[in-house]
Each structure stands twice: as C-alpha cells, then as structure tokens.
Image (cartoon, rainbow, N blue to C red):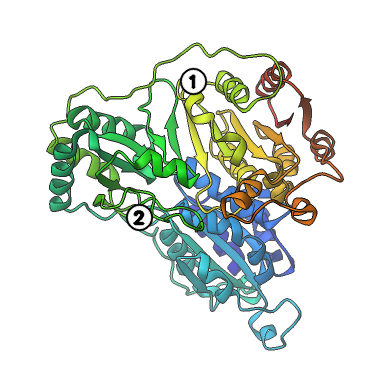
Amino acid sequence: MNGAESLVRTLLDEGTDVCFTNPGTSEMHFVAALDRVPGMRCVLGLFEGVVTGAADGYWRIARRPASTLLHLGPGLANGLANLHNARKARSGIVNVVGEHATMHVALDAPLTSDIEGIARPMSHWVHTIGSAGGVEAATRSAVQAAATPPGRIATLVLPADCAWTEVPAGAPRGARAPRLAPAPVDAAAVEAAAAALREGGGAALLLLGGEACHEAGLEAAGRIAAATGCALMTEFAVARTARGAGRVVANRVPYVPDAAIAALAPYRTIVLLGAREPVSFFAYPGKRGRQAAPGVRFVELADANQDLAAALDALGDATGARGRAPAGVASRGAIASPDGPMTLEGIGRIVAAAIPEHAIVVDESVSSGRAFGAFTASAAPHDWLTGCGGAIGFGLPTAIGAAIAAPDRKILALEGDGSAMYTVQSLWTMAREGLDVTVLVFANRAYRILQGEYAGVGAGTPGPRATDMLSLDRPAIDWVSMARGMGVEAGRATDLGQLARQLERGFASKGPYLVEAAL
C-alpha cells in the first residue's frame, strides 16, 4: 500500500466518501488509488471553483465533510473564492492538494509555489505530509479539523513522492479521530439573554445564525418568541434555513443598507444567537456601516462555535417557553401562478408555487431574488441556501454538492446570468452525474447588482464605458444553447406563463434542466 492508497483508505474510514476532483500530474497516484480502494464517489469538476463550491454544498446538507482533490498551488488558488464562501458559511471541507515530489521542489519548476501560504487565508488548518508513513495520521487530523463545530476548512498537502512511496511495514495504524463537540453555553449568558428578551418585549429581537436557522432551531426560537413577545430574524447570509409551510418564519436582515436600517430600527435590544452584529457589505458615503439603531443593546447568548441547540433549549427554559406553541408558523397558502409579462413579483409567485415538497433551493439570484422571501414563506416546506462570503459563483457548484448529499430531493438553483458565468462549468458536471437540479437563470443581460451599487456609492450617472463594464450584452449570452452544449436540456421563458411551464418541465425531469428567464 502506497501513501496515496493510505490516504484514500483513511478518508473512507473517517466517513469521508465523496471527493470532488480536478487533478493534475502530481495527483495521479491518488487517482490510481481511487480504482484500487473501492468506496469513494469521485465527482469531476472542470474548474476548481466548481470543486470547492460543491464541497461547500455537500457539507450544508450532509453535515459531514467531503474532500477535494486540487492540483498544486495554482489549482488551489483557482478554488479559493468558493473556499472563502465555504469558510464564511462555516462548512467543513478536507482539501487534498498535490505538491511536487520533495526532491523536485528545490528545482523551482514552473508550477512550484508556496501552497501553505496560498491555503492559510482560507483554511483553519494546514499541514504538509512529510512521509508515506505519516499519511494516515495526518489524514485523520485533517478530517477531525474539518468536522470541528461548526465546520472548518482543512488543507492537507500531499507531495508526490509521499503518494507513490510504499508505507513502511511498521508504520502505526491509527484509530478513527474523535469528533469534537461544540463549546458549551455559559449559564450567565443564558440568564442575561432571557432577561433582555423578557424586558424588551416587542422592542427586542432574537437574531439567529448558523444551525439555529435549521427547522428545529426555528421551532425553538418560535416558542421563545411566543413566551416573550420578541421578534425573530436571521442574518442576511444564512448557510441553510428552513422555510415554507409549517416552519417558523424568520425573515432575513435585508441586503440593501437603507432597507436593513429600516427593518432593525424598531429594536432596542438584540440578542445574538449564532449571529453577529448586522453590518453592511460595503461602506457608502454618508451612511453608517452598523445597521442597528444607534444605542441598541447587544446581548450575545452564543456564537457560532457554541452548542446552539443547547442554547435554545436553555433559553426556552429560562423564558418559560417549553411546551408553548411556536409563534409565526407559516401556513400553506394557495399561491396563484400569474400570467403576463415578466415582473419580479410575478416571478416570485411562480417560483413559490413551483417549489416541490422538501426541495433544496440554492439562491444566487442576487438582485432578481430579493423579493422571493415574502412569497416563498407559504410554499411547500423546503431548505434555502444562500451565499455567505459574497464571492460570486457559489450557486451552481453548491447545487451540485447539495444534490449529491440528498439524491432523493429536488434541487432548484436560482442564478443571475452574471454570477452563473463564473462557474458555468457546473452544468457539465450536473449532466455527467445525472443530478436532479433545475437551474433558473435570470437573464437580465447585466450585472444588475453592480448597477445598483454604482448608484449606492454615489458614483454619478454611468457613461458609456461604465455602462459597458456593468452590462452583459454585445453579445447576449444564449443560455439555452450553452446548457445544451454541456449536456443539459434547457428552455427559454419570455413571460410568466412560459416560466411556470418550463419550471414544471424541469421538476418533472430526472436529470438537470435549465430555464432561461429572459428579463
């Protein structure tokens, strides 16, 4: 057994049985090991940002780490944007990055780079393997690091000679690495939060993040709201939240600063549970970056590294919420599918009516999707995944990972045309793997969010050059042809009736389907 085979065997023994790959020469012994050691599902991505984004989506649904296989420093660098998103989403990932053989590094060949230096800004744990005999222990440590609550990025560098060298006969065999529990919640913090909510009543807000936004967390928070009269909201950037009929409604803090400031204005006390103080994504001339009202009192019950389920249980006991019916549960409503020209409100209603039972929605619709929350609250029960790091191109890869983690659930990916182009290679992987993903691309032929940001920062009226930098015409992207060229069946909708029919067709298919909504 060589080092590469040892690595694959150890990953499988640790429960990591999915590997998203984009290998090169230095990783060929790892690739060979995938045939010699059965059990690993290997998924090829044609760009490393697809690979790392898929691993992010896998963690969000499966709650256990997948591995990636990346080629040297440049390959890792190509995947960094979605590792940034994964880090902000608190997803656990084990990156396996090939390195030149140890004796070759000193030759400074063209692909030589400081892999650890590239990895550190987006990783919580980085290690370079020193010998074939050290592969197993390092791999177990990497998986343990990735699975450390709430989820972390671990990067393991595998020199080529450590992969091809036989593991010494006397090399120690390790047991599975123990999984670490989340940090406990401080009893004094629970009492302070309970007092703040009781005293604040309707002027108090319980702001949720992390796993507190999952179905059980929202239900517990709804009971606390019923007991105290507090309001519930979630952070804008939520890795996964439960929505739809039968779930407690907790609206996201809006993205647009003026809207966020208005939404938070009524609250004089904000209790943070797995969330951070709401701040704007960017600085704007004449506007404050902190979105809560001046003088608001913040009470931190628990951060994302702590046991949020235990925190909710303790807070429920401290506020007398146990046994109460949760407040704000959404009821199933009849959602009419309108006809006529494309409008954002009409699209929101169409999407809400079309969401299948227990679907997973991956939302990178950016400006086109900001109004969807109100319409989808009464849709079929579903999980909603959003980008957490702000780096463009997370949506399509995350849909891949979610589909592989939950093959029995329908996936709906809501995508802007500009953001979809960052990781458009995802369509090929969806086709190759036969993934049950319906992609809805909002083709407004522009970086619409940047047009709004241009106005928001007070840059004036865009001239012809600025307009060119913010538009996607000349030529217009033909999404139907692009999808079909990558093996994904597709259709175009130019009005709401066509959109409803195209989504119905997509959800009826057993593989990927793309709908281009021409706006």
Relative to 322, is 168 above or below? below
Mark 2: few/some/many CA within 10 Å (<14, 14-19, 20+) = few
Residue 280 x, y percent position in the rendering = 46, 52
**Which mark's residue is nearer the viewer, 1 or 2?**
1
Q: Position of residue 121 (x, y in %)?
A: 51, 69
Q: Looking at the image, is 385 positioned above or below residue 156?
A: above
Q: In screen coordinates, is 443 left or right of 328? A: right
Q: Which mark is residue 372?
A: none
Q: Residue at x 43, y 71 (%)?
A: 172
Q: Residue at x 69, y 19 (%)?
A: 496
Residue 380: mark in rendering:
1
- Kind of residue at badge 2: Arg
Q: Is residue 277 visible?
A: yes
Q: Nearer the viewer, residue 288 or 126?
A: 288
The image shows a total of numbered marks equal to 2
At 13% from the left and 52% from the top, the residue drawn is 188
Q: Residue 439: name its quadrant.
A: top right
Q: Quadrant of residue 84?
A: bottom right
Q: Is residue 380 left or right of residue 422?
A: left
Q: Work out whether residue 1 can be spotted.
A: no
In the picture of the structure, the residue carrying the numbered disc 2 is 179
Give how far apart the Cα atoms at labels 1 and 2 are.
35 Å
Q: Amino acid at mark 1?
A: Ala
Query: Quarter of the image containing the N terminus?
Result: bottom right
Residue 138: % across, % down:
47, 69
Query: In the image, residue 8 lies at what x, y percent?
Result: 57, 58
Q: Mark 1: few, some, or many residues within 10 Å (few <14, many ≥20)? A: many
- Disc 2 secondary structure class: loop
